[in-house]
Each structure stands twice: as structure tokens, then as C-alpha cells.
Image: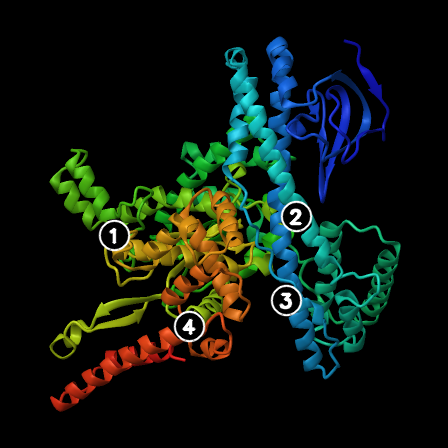
Amino acid sequence: MAGIILNKDRKVYTYGQPMTSLHLITEGKVRADYPGGSFLLGKGDVIGICEICSEVHFLEYTVTETATILTYPVTNIEALEDFMQKHPDISRFFLLSAFHQIGKLQNSYSLSHVRCGNLYQNLLSDYSAYNKLCERYRLPARPMDELSAYTAYLEDEIPDLWLNEFYAGFSRLYAGPAQKALMQESSASLGMLRKCSLDFRKTYLGAEEQYHYLQGLRHFYFDPSGNDLFDRYTSLYYKMGAACEDMPPVLDAIERMIRDFAADCDCEDPATARRILSFRQEAKHIANRTVSPAQSDGSGSALPSELLGSLNTILDYAGSELDVTDSFRKHVQTYRALTDKTAMDAETSSLRKSVTEEFYILYSLIFERSLSSGFLPAPVRMFLYFGYVDEDLAGHENTVFLYSLLNQITSHKDCGVYTFYDWLLAIFNGEKMPSRNEFDQDYSDYIHKQKVSGSITDSELRQLEDNAMAKVNFELKNLFPLVNKITFGHVTTFCPVFSSDNVLKNLKDTYVTVGKISSALEQIRAVDYTAFYRESLDLDHLDIMGKEPVHTEYLPDVILMPNVGIRGSMWQEIEGRIRNSPGRMFLSIFHMEDVTTTLIRLTGEFRWELCKRIQGGRWNDISDPSLTSEYYDYIQFYRKNHDLTPEAKERLRTSLQRAKNSFREMFVRDYMIWVLFEGKGSPRLNKVSRKILFTYCPFPQKICRSLQDNPLYTELLERHRIKTAQKLHHLDALEQKILRSKSPVPESLTRERRYLTSASS
């Protein structure tokens, strides 16, 4: 078949054109454009293969380098089936290209998801900082009333993280020795193409939604009218004066707005370009008049001498005689030289795997040596806290910033916040027990199972029960690799070493501090004040209190993993078998998402799992009412629920599909809405879901008062008020009984009264 030559800049297809043919590229390059992004197709790729289940093209294809194509008259999936049976050799290119294209789109989708969250959080932060600075310098602040109409970006469907690895695996299969056997199964190949096309379409719709969200927020920063944040900040910059101490952060914020705008909004508006150019010229003029070195932001700081050759320092500390150190050095150097560290080819994937395995071996070895070492070099401490291994891999500015953090990191175990290194120290010192493994076994269960299976003897069991380093190794082996990958987020391209390629926003903004975690937990408890309370008995006053239940709060331990990531993990709801103990949540130490939103999601997961733990085998038994049993019954039988409108039932059906029929995921999404919206007087839930959430996650007194005139809550508030009054009356009677016996009133009774009055309205 003779090839057709297409010149550069030729449009192959535009959005909305009907499917007429598939085109195999034999030479040249073609760019596929979609809302908010694009990817390149080259030799062996097939134009239109991922749109085969659609009647029209939803991508635009433009030749970027003179291309030669072969055309096949395939317009739909039925025609493709006939073609694949007749031409199995060519069909292989169709499959490989489809896998390649969906991988590109999904990678872009994940990055865009992060940008959506970043832009919105930056918007709120910038507007808040602007108002505070205006108040500080007694300048009139210009309001942005329309800002209240926009909310955080909450996706209806979280991307399937496993799909990238799924299609990458099939790509290797179809490119490997098994390709002939696979191609003989034409029905399986056709099914793969059909699934790939549908997954591609779903990912495309998500990318389109993200693009429109970013465009909707765009005018807050750069609006054609000029009434935007850029104008507010630049005006503030000019008015504050050159010697003002707040000048550098304002300038940083303006430059970040420009960077974010260029990255997220892709605007070529000449008026905006002139505004940016005009500001930079004026800022340069101001800087020339201001010579004070105190205004330096430190970005040009020289690298401290002790960080030069960081990799060698770390490996020398580990012990250069070990074979793994030489291997790790070579692998890191190779990884550092890669232009695309997220590539999915076999060679790059194998390199990432090798670096990962050796990293964990070194981490375990260095931690153990740090216990007996009186001095930890700065690169070693950065390795333990951040996963840092090399100054060039981390980037100059990032390395300087990581180094500056070393003097700020102190133990916050009293606040329940740990770096991963400090967490391991707490386990070693007996302050914390190791976490459960992925099979829900704690350390004690694990070693006793080893004894039962004959892997260890009685004497070895007794030694392991009190062996501090064995407990640390259990944590390093069973939790560290898995949670480190989960919190990183992009599991298919995960590599634990700190790399500048993973830093998608300013490290200073993403650094998770105790203040950020405390603030997030306070926001959650301001809406769901009972979130971390447990019901128990007052064991110190059993003779007086008897079996009267009291509530005590146990805030979760938050452990910061040594990576740059986008996700959190609610690993376990209690410690071991002790119900009255803190849960465990994990975040990246540099968390690129909003910390508050992530912790709200983790708290929803925590509430679900804790209820299941307390209820045991009856967690979904509606005859024993609980949060999980009532929510399970609600979702399972929603079609027969007369309290739900047809529209609500249809939304539930769609949501359940998106949640992959996970009742827990459905609850977590409702819980996030409960905290983010319902708690602020913005109803989003249906009647049944609202009743369940109000019953088991009640609002505190302040919110109840603000909702008392809302008809949606009238019945719920009245029922809750009556139940609370009954409980308070019971406590009054108990207190009178204690006073008559001339015994002192226990503090637990006073705390229980405060707990109940927080809910009364």
C-alpha cells in the first residue's frame, strides 16, 4: 500500500469530524490536541484508534513533522473486528498505539488534577494574604465578591491509578515474544481495544472538565477588565515602598501568579503580556533603587560545602564495603541522566525498580547505624527525612531549601505528628507499636504465626517479643514500601529518591508542618466534633460510675513519609487491639494537594473503619443500628426507599458506578460533602444521607444554632435536642446520686457533660 505524505502544519482531523479511516504513521510526527493539553504520535502510532468507539473525532490531529501515513477504511468497532481477523500483523500496531496513547493522556490527567487543586488553593491563599497586607498597611482592600461562588475542585470520579500499569503491562506483552499467541485471540484483542477506547473517552472527559474548571478560575488572576488579583498585588507592591519587609513575599506571589497562569491557562492575550512586561520593568527599576541584601530570597544561595557529593557522603556513612552501595551509586547516576524519568519502557521501569529496592535496603541500614552514631551528616539526615540522595537530582534550589529545613525539624510526638524517621525512633524506643501489615496482622500476630508455622522456635519468639530493632524492621518491611508508594500517588512511575521532576509546585508551600495538620484537624472538628471520640468506661471510678459510658478524644497520629506526593493513607483506626488508642494516617512530607481536603477524606475513612472495628461481624446488620449498618442499608436498598426522589435515585446509581460499588467510598464522598458544604450551610446531600450523617456525625452547638431556621434540619435538630436532653437528665440524676453518697464528682462526668452540651442546640 502506497503511503500518503502530509506536510507540516496539515490538519488531519478537527474536533467533531466523523470517523472515516484509521491512519498508521510510518514516518514523521503528528500532535494530538485535547482541551488543556496534547501529546505526540510517531512512527507506529495509529491516528484515531482511541476514538474507534465514537462516531466522531474528539481530538484534533496536526502534522508537526512531515509525515507518511497508511490509510485503512475502518470507521467503527464492527469494521475493526473484520479488519483484525484479516490482518493480525497490522492489528498489533493498533493495540500498541492505543496503549501508548491512553498512557500519555492519563499521565497528563493526573498532573492536571494537581494543578486544579493548586490553583484554587493559591487563589484563596493569595486573596487572604492580600486582605491581611492591606489591613496591616492601612490600605483600602478591593473586594472580590464573586470569589464566594467558586468551590474547591471535587472530581466525581478519581482516576483509576492501576490503569497505567495495566496497559503498560499489555504493551509489553504485545511487544514481546508472546505477541503471536496473543494476536491469534482476535476476540481478546478486540475487547482490549474496545475497553481502551472507552477508558480513553472517560479520561478525556475528565481532562475536559479540568480544563473548563481552570478556565473558570482564570479571570480571578488575569481578567481582560484588569480587575483581578494581579492588579491588586501589583498596586499593593507599588504602594508598600521599596524598603518594606513584606516586599519579597509580595513579589514572590506575583511571579508565582505569572508562572501558574502561563502553565495552567495557556493564554496568549497581548494585553496581559503587556501588563506583565510593564510590571517587570517597574519591579526591576524598584530593585535597582533598593540595595539592601536583606531582600534576597535566598534562591541564589551557594550550595553548602557539606552537600557537595551528597551521594558519596550517604553511601560512605552506610558502609562503602557493601555491594549494594556501588550498585546504588551507578543506578542513581543513570536515573539522574534520564530525560524522561516517568517513561514506561522496560529499561526505565527496570531501573526504577532497582533504585527502589536498593533505596529501602540503604534506609534500613542507615537507620540502624544512626542509633549508635553520635553525629549524622546533613546529607544523611536529608536522606532519612526527605529521601534525598543527590544534589543534582534534587535540583539546586530544592537542595538549599531541604538543607534549611534541617534546623526547623524537631520532635512533635506530643502533638501526634512524626516524620517517618522519628516514627521509627518511637517504635525503637517502645513508645509506639509497629503498624499492622497489609494482611491486617500486627507485630505480635505476625511472630506468633511464624511460631505456629515452625519458622521460629520458642526461644526465638521470646527474643523477638522484646527486640526493638526487629519491630523497626517489621515496620520497614511491611509498611514503608507500600505506604511510600501510596502517598506518592503515581504508583506506575514511583521512585523513592527525591527528584526535582516530582516537584510540581513550590516546596515551601507543600511542606507539611504541625500547624497545617493542627489547623486541618481543627476545621474538621469544628464541623464533626465527635470525629475522634471513643466510648469507654471510667476504670478509675468504677465503684462510683459503674458501667456508665464516657467519651474520650484520641486524635490520630500523622506520620510524614519521605517523599513528594499527592495522596494520603488512613492505614489503621486503632493501635493493635486497643480500641482507645490513636489511629494512624500517613501523608507525604511535601504534600502537593490541599492538606485539609486530604485529611477530611482520611477522617471519613477512619470513621467507617472504626465503626466496623467496634461493631465486628455485625457492622452491616441493620438490627443493630450504627453508622455503617444504616449507611449500608441505605445504599443497598436505595431503589426501594420512598424518601428518595427518582432524581436522587438516579444520582445514587451513577455515583455507585463511579465508586465501583464501594459502600465505603460512597460514604467517604458524602462525608467530605458533609464537612465541606453542609457544615457551612450549603445543602448538597439527599434527605436519607443527611439524616445518617447528622445522627452519627452531629454538628456542634454553633452550627446547630445557625441551622435552626432551615426546614431541612428542623426535624433532625428537634430529635437531636430531645435525645441530648434525655442524656443530660440521666447525668444529672447520676451526679445527684454521687453527691448524696458524699463522694467527689469524677472529672470524667464533667467531661461527659461538656461533650453532650457541645451537641445541644
Graded by Cα atoms within 10 Å as few (under 14), some (14 to 19) or many (20 or more), the crowding at tag 1 reads some
- State the separation of the CA atoms marked 3 and 1: 45 Å
Amino acid beneath label 2 = Glu
| Lower sequence index among marks 1 and 2 | 2
| Lower sequence index among marks 2 and 4 | 2
Answer above or below: position of 563 versus 129: above
Q: Secondary structure at mark 2?
A: helix
| Lower sequence index among marks 3 and 4 | 3
> Of the residues tagged 3 and 1, which is closer to the observer?
1
> Of the residues tagged 2 and 3, which is closer to the observer?
2
Residue at 65% in and 71% down: 128
Residue situated in front as seen by the camera: 450 or 85: 85
> Of the residues tagged 2 and 4, which is closer to the observer?
4
Task: Locate the N terminus by quadrant.
Answer: top right
Percent across and percent down for residue 576 are 26, 54
Amino acid beneath label 3 = Ser
Amino acid beneath label 1 = Arg
- State the separation of the CA atoms marked 4 and 1: 29 Å
In this figure, which residue is indicated by the disc labeled 1?
618
Residue 125, numbered circle: 3
Residue at 80% in and 10% down: 2
In this figure, which residue is indicated by the disc labeled 4?
715
Q: Is residue 713 visible?
A: yes
Residue 209, numbered circle: 2
Q: Secondary structure at mark 3?
A: helix
Check contact, mark 2 vs mark 4: CB within 8 A: no
Amino acid beneath label 4 = Glu
Name which quarter of the figure residue 583 lies in: bottom left
- State the separation of the CA atoms marked 2 and 3: 23 Å
